[in-house]
Image (cartoon, rainbow, N blue to C red):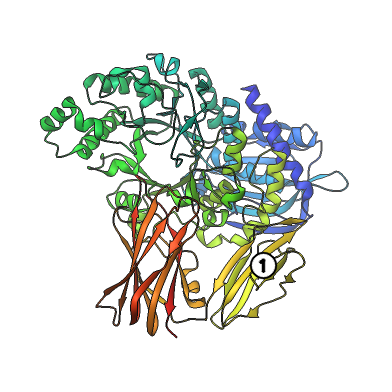
């Protein structure tokens, strides 16, 4: 483990040195602590400074802190169990149960810094905060500002996921990934180890899983949406030996991170079937899957297959001490079960109505096995289909509805909704970004995510363990690209999961993140540049009185805008304050800071219609700033947030226009999001009273994967109505899709 210590020390050097960029009295901590009271003086590190481990259970934390400080400052601080002045002291205190297992108090005075906690994890997180407090003066002195901090996490599960099946990531990078989680006070690493495209964990009893299942004879080139798939025909793969896994598990444990392994079943298992064809439903030989998407090759339900799965899980449990074992359970095509005589006979024997209940029986059986070994099963929200295993926990990825259903039934839930926590989605303009799976999940959107659904009362909300970010690697081939997609969005999620809800402040977070980005620079983290991540993205808003304001999160930035349809440059009019635009028009704006320009943002406003009001929507919630947008202009932004009903069903939005108009037509303009599905059409209904509705017209769409083309619904004749209903009709292509767009009306003057 010496390599691990050196690795942490090297990373912490970078964290500390970045403090040189800070002003003397600047305190920038991420995640934001629960409470913080700055003082007036400084604690200065000297050669005689020692690190006191007052309890043998904090020696690991003291040793890691000493390694980090020694490498950074060159002062070679030593650990001790003797109390003296000018110390950094770590204490475990029985009376601090109110802080929980991960909370801490940090009190920095001019002659000592004390970190008090109930458990070692709390002391470790106190040390992470201390490292973010450290800075270097112009005279070369290392110092910590006097401050009193009391801190503890909001959620128990604060995690990040990593798929190493589509593209394999070396063990050294996995350790770096863990280091970054620890730095941001994350405590869970979800390691996706098996899938159709590769089996990445050595299983001694079944060597072909890695001899055959870890390698494929080609990898898909280009996007999965392409009409004709192409492959590179290059032999590709890799796996982790059990020795490597044990080392990584120990490495993570020293940093108070639990690793949750995922072994997919009953679907996403073509790599296993390639190694052992008898595990499949057809018995035929197949290769490891080369392309993206979902394979129809799934496990059969024979006793020999369950023996195989139990043998695999036995070895997995011997490597990982996680209370949870993830079994996937998602995206399971039932075609082969429907055609498999044995599966059909098993359904008849068990009295099961359909293949969904057969999957539920499958998951129940694995749950029983894991429970017998004092482990808990967790899976994606498809494991709800056909009935949830009694002790199982759920990861709610298809929006929030699965998590709500599970929590109401008394099951623990980790929130992983795709359009907030899937970091393989685009985070900036797709035209300027590397190819991604689709979606559009910005830094700001991640920061404003609330893991506890409003639909849950307090008694059921306690089942929300927390949330995590997902990195699926179909289009992420290398560690640097993993970092680019994960950061800084993972930093935002870390604050969502640690900081109290009422302490969150996005504008303040952005200011702290600009300092924090220097730490990421020193760590050689290839994060998405902040000008792309939203720092220099103008926000264009119009108030009820018709005045427009433009802002961005970099206070020193200059904002330029145009009203004539041309693209703004540094020669355009500079924004100096709000201005009137009651009759509407097109505004384009760009923000510039330190010779870097953010994206050009365009906003279309019609005449002010402040009386619009949403009556009802069957989506999770109206979109960002929906209430303000409805008051501001004659377009209504509506965001379905992974539609709460089955994706195959229509979804509606009712709008009160405030008074009766003669409606000539209506539009729904999709915003680019590169989602997995396709809207086929939408319908508009009109009503004079909000009770009696008539179909007014239909809008059709074409080619809306990346270039969204919309055809307005022009009514046959003007309709007098006060109420408008929008209904989306969509073709999902197997996956739910978050639809974001703009509704407008055409009024006869």
Q: Which residue is mark 1?
A: 566
Screen quadrant of the C terminus: bottom left
Q: Position of residue 701 (x, y in %)?
A: 40, 58
> In this rendering, would 361 be left or right of 479?
left
Asked whether residue 451 is in view, the answer is yes
Residue at the (44%, 48%) spot, across then down: 418
> In this rendering, would 734 be left or right of 15?
left
Q: How many numbered dots are placed on residues in this image?
A: 1
Asked whether residue 92 is in view, the answer is no
> In this rendering, would 694 be left or right of 107?
left
Which quadrant of the view contains residue 698?
A: bottom left
On screen, 13 above or below 490? above
Screen quadrant of the N terminus: top right
> In this rendering, would 359 be left or right of 532?
left
**Is 735 or 140 nearer to us in this picture?**
735
Q: Local crowd at mark 1 within 10 Å, few (<14), some, or many (≥20)?
A: few
Q: Secondary structure at mark 1?
A: loop
Residue at the (47%, 45%) spot, across then down: 468
**Is 615 or 58 nearer to us in this picture?**
615
**Is 619 or 372 nearer to us in this picture?**
619
Q: Residue pushed farthest right?
A: 139
Which quadrant of the view contains residue 344?
A: top left
On screen, 361 above or below 674? above
Q: Position of residue 485 (x, y in %)?
A: 57, 43
Q: Position of residue 465 (x, y in %)?
A: 41, 47
On screen, 4 above or below 40? above
Q: Position of residue 89 (x, y in %)?
A: 67, 41
């Amino acid at each position: 483990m010496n390599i691990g210590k050196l690795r942490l020390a090297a990373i912490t050097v970078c964290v500390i040195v970045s403090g040189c960029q800070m002003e003397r009295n600047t305190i920038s901590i991420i995640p934001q602590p629960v409470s913080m009271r700055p003082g007036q003086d400084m604690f200065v590190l000297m050669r005689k400074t020692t690190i006191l481990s007052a309890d043998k259970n904090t020696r690991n934390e003291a040793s890691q802190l000493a390694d980090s400080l020694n490498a950074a400052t060159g002062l070679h601080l030593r650990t001790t169990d003797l109390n003296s002045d000018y110390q950094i002291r770590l204490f475990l205190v029985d009376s601090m149960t109110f802080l929980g297992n991960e909370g801490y108090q940090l009190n920095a005075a001019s002659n000592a810094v004390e970190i008090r906690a109930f458990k070692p994890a709390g002391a470790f997180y106190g040390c992470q905060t201390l490292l973010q407090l450290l800075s270097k003066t112009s005279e070369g002195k290392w110092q910590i500002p006097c401050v009193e901090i009391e801190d503890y996490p909001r959620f128990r599960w604060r995690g990040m996921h990593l798929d190493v099946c589509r593209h394999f990531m070396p063990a050294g990078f996995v350790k770096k990934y863990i280091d970054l989680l620890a730095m941001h006070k994350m405590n869970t690493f979800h390691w996706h180890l098996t899938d159709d495209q590769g089996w990445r964990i050595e299983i001694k009893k079944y060597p072909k899983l890695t001899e055959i299942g870890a390698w494929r004879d080609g990898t898909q080139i280009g996007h999965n949406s392409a009409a004709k798939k192409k492959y590179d025909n290059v032999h590709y793969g890799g796996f982790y030996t059990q020795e490597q896994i044990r080392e990584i598990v120990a490495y993570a444990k020293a940093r108070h991170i639990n690793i949750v392994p995922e072994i997919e079943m009953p679907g996403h298992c073509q790599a296993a079937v390639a190694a052992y064809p008898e595990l499949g439903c057809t018995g035929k030989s197949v290769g490891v899957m080369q392309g993206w998407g979902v394979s129809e090759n799934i496990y059969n339900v024979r006793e020999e297959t369950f023996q195989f799965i139990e043998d695999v899980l036995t070895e997995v449990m011997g490597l990982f001490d996680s209370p949870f074992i993830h079994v996937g359970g998602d995206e399971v095509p039932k075609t082969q079960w429907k055609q498999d005589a044995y599966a059909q006979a098993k359904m008849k024997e068990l009295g099961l109505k359909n293949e969904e209940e057969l999957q539920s029986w499958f998951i129940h059986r694995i749950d029983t096995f894991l429970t017998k070994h004092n482990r808990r099963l967790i899976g994606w929200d498809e494991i709800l289909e056909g009935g949830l295993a009694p002790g199982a926990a759920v990861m709610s990825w298809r929006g929030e509805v699965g998590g709500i259903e599970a929590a109401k039934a008394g099951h623990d839930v980790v929130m992983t909704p795709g359009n907030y926590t899937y970091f393989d989605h685009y985070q900036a303009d797709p035209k300027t970004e590397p190819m991604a799976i689709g979606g559009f999940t910005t830094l700001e959107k991640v920061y404003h995510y609330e893991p506890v659904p409003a639909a849950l009362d307090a008694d059921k909300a306690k089942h929300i363990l927390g949330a995590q970010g997902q990195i699926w690697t179909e289009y992420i081939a290398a560690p640097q690209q993993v970092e680019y997609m994960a950061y800084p969005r993972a930093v935002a999620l870390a604050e969502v999961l640690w900081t109290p809800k009422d302490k969150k402040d996005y504008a303040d977070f952005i200011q702290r993140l600009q300092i924090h980005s220097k730490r990421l620079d020193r760590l050689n983290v290839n994060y998405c540049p902040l000008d792309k991540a939203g720092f220099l993205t103008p926000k264009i808003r119009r108030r009820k009185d018709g005045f427009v304001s433009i802002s961005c999160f970099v206070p020193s930035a200059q904002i330029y805008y145009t009203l004539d349809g041309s693209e703004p440059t540094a020669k355009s009019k500079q924004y100096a304050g709000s201005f009137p635009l009651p009759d509407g028009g097109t505004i384009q704006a760009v923000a510039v800071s330190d010779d870097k320009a953010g994206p050009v943002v365009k906003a279309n406003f019609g005449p002010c219609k402040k009386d619009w009001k949403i009556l009802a929507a069957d989506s999770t919630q109206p979109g960002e700033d929906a209430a303000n947008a409805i008051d501001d202009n004659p377009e209504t932004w509506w965001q379905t947030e992974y539609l709460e009903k089955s994706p195959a069903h229509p979804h509606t939005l009712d709008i009160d226009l405030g008074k009766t108009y003669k409606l000539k037509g209506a539009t729904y303009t999709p915003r680019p999001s590169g989602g997995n599905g396709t809207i086929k059409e939408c319908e508009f209904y009109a009503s004079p009273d909000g009770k009696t509705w008539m179909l007014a017209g239909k809008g059709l769409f074409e080619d809306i994967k990346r270039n969204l083309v919309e055809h307005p619904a022009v009514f046959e004749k003007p309709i007098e109505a006060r109420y408008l209903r929008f209904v989306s009709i969509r073709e999902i292509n197997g996956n739910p899709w978050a639809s974001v767009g703009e509704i407008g009306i055409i009024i006869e003057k």
